[in-house]
Image (cartoon, grey):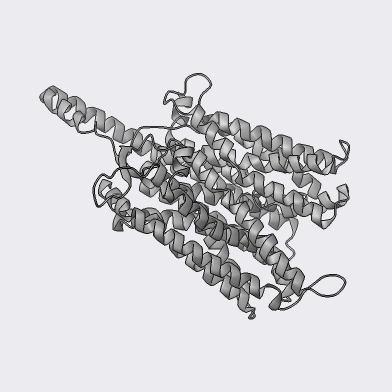
Amino acid sequence: MEWLRLSNKWMATVASMWIQFSIGSYTFGVYSSVLKSSQGYDRSTLETLAVFRDIGSSAGVLSGVLYTAVTHSNSYSGFCGPWLVHLAGAIQNFLGNFLTWAAVVGLIKRPPVPLMCLFMFFSSHSMPFFNTANTVSGVQNFPDYSGTIVGIMKGCTGISGAILIQAYNTFNKGEPSTFLLILALWPTFVSLVLMLLVRNYKANTSDVKKYLNGFSALALIVAGYLMIMIILENIFSLPLWARIFSNVLLLLLLASPLGIAIKAQKEDSKRFVETLSFESNTSMENPKSVCSSSDSFVAKDLAYHELPSGEGQVNAALDDTILFDEEGGMNLLQAMCTVNFWLLFIAMVCGMGSTQAVLNNLSQIGQSLNYTTVEVNNLVSLWSIWNCLGRVGVGYLSDYLLHTRGLARPLLMAITLATIGIGNIVIASGFPGTLYVGSIIMGICDGSQWSLMPTITLDLFGVRHMGTIFNTIGIACPLGSYIFSVRVIGYIYDKEAGGEDHSCFGARCFMSSFFIMASLAFLGFLFVVALFQRTKGFYMLRRLKY
């Protein structure tokens, strides 16, 4: 009976949130220094390792393929189910981080650079497996609020690094090699313990919105609490007892989703009993009414999608579209043969590439503009908080606007791309304090994209191969980051730099780069506007469903 109580969509959501909280994203900067010193790397080699880590965290096509393969059956008999995706992620996480730690502390012989790049790739390649299993399962459990649940999962990922860093700073600060061991053990342990709880449930409940909003609010509360602690720790030197107390409060906040899940499940159980009682009474009074009412639920929701071949029309109002079962959808190759896929992909190269380039160069930009070390550390530390705000907030907003106004999600993506352009211009101006404003804008927009892109992918191409398709589109992030960071920011910075140390100071170091990125963000905006025009009729039809 205890297992049956744990086996429901609310406990699956809590388990997914806890796994996402444990992942430890945006933490390379914590141990990069000890990695460089222990292995004798130069700056160029360290950047190469960082690139492989970025590629691993974004190239999640295999995780999507695996998820589709092991969840194609609703029964999950035998060895099928999302837990296999979690297991694959846990193995990669442990091997990648543990072997890196072993090399750093001298447990194994110093590996050659290509092998260390492979360690970096495996350690970060585990993230797409956790993300795919938790995000797609959440979407399948709450199909009417896909934007909200994607925002929750992505938001938990966004602040996971800040959570682990808080614990590390309390007990092991100054020992970055220990942090590597924490990364190897903690996410692996949490995922192995909780992975069997993450399952897909078909039962519908009439009122899930308020509980999902509760999860969203808790994620934002955790992010706000972390923001306060980060600022306090960068300004004051907190005693050990204060840091331990703050970590206890953080643990209580992280445990609080369990209370929401218990309350939601109690309401579901009560409603289920009432429904059975009502149907039993109705069947005794009028058996025919039961048959007629059940027949009304036979029809499935249909969604329209672009034909890969571009052949045929349903009617003049729905260009290049077909009606098909929403539970099916397109596979990756079919999706890649559509215009909608490439409109979204190119827009993400312009948007995600720009925000990732800002994050990668935030410290260097701060130094060039004469920000203090404390100010630069605050900017870098708080990025994950703004990122979480964008992921959770825009995920909720996209559902709200779709349900109440019928507004297409690509419209929010267009607003995000336009705002990224504004953020680039703000940073390019170089006025005092603009880096604070610009980093907040870019951090929120970065999170918004990671919330909207998977949800738009679900809407346009269906849920069956969602994990494969949105992870493929996610490759736009490292691709755009390479173009902007290396070919734009790095190239122009080197041209502007002078002296033997090749350093540059002043707004001129990055001004041209940010104006170029602002222009390309506007180009991405135009691509998303085109996507919006192609899909706004579809989203109006989706509103009728609600």
Tell me: 149 left or right of 351.
Answer: left
Classify 217 as above or below 375. above
Classify 16 as above or below 360. above
Classify 270 as above or below 77. below
Tell me: 385 left or right of 501.
Answer: left
Residue at left offset 54%, top offset 29%: 196
Tell me: 493 left or right of 405.
Answer: right
Question: Which image quarter: residue 266?
Answer: top left
Question: Which image quarter: residue 296?
Answer: top left
- Front position in the image: 469 or 164: 469
Image location of residue 348, percent across then percent down: 53, 55
Task: Point out the residue furthest to the top here.
Answer: 78
Regarding residue 129, the answer to whether it shows in the image is yes
Classify 356 as above or below 511. above
Residue at left offset 57%, top offset 62%: 443
Question: Which image quarter: residue 274?
Answer: top left
- Front position in the image: 35 or 191: 35
Image location of residue 261, percent across then percent down: 44, 40
Count of numbered badges drawn on the protein = 0
- Front position in the image: 261 or 140: 140
Q: Quadrant of the N terminus?
A: top left
Regarding residue 436, the answer to whether it shows in the image is no
Image location of residue 389, percent across then percent down: 52, 59
Image location of residue 405, percent across then percent down: 30, 58
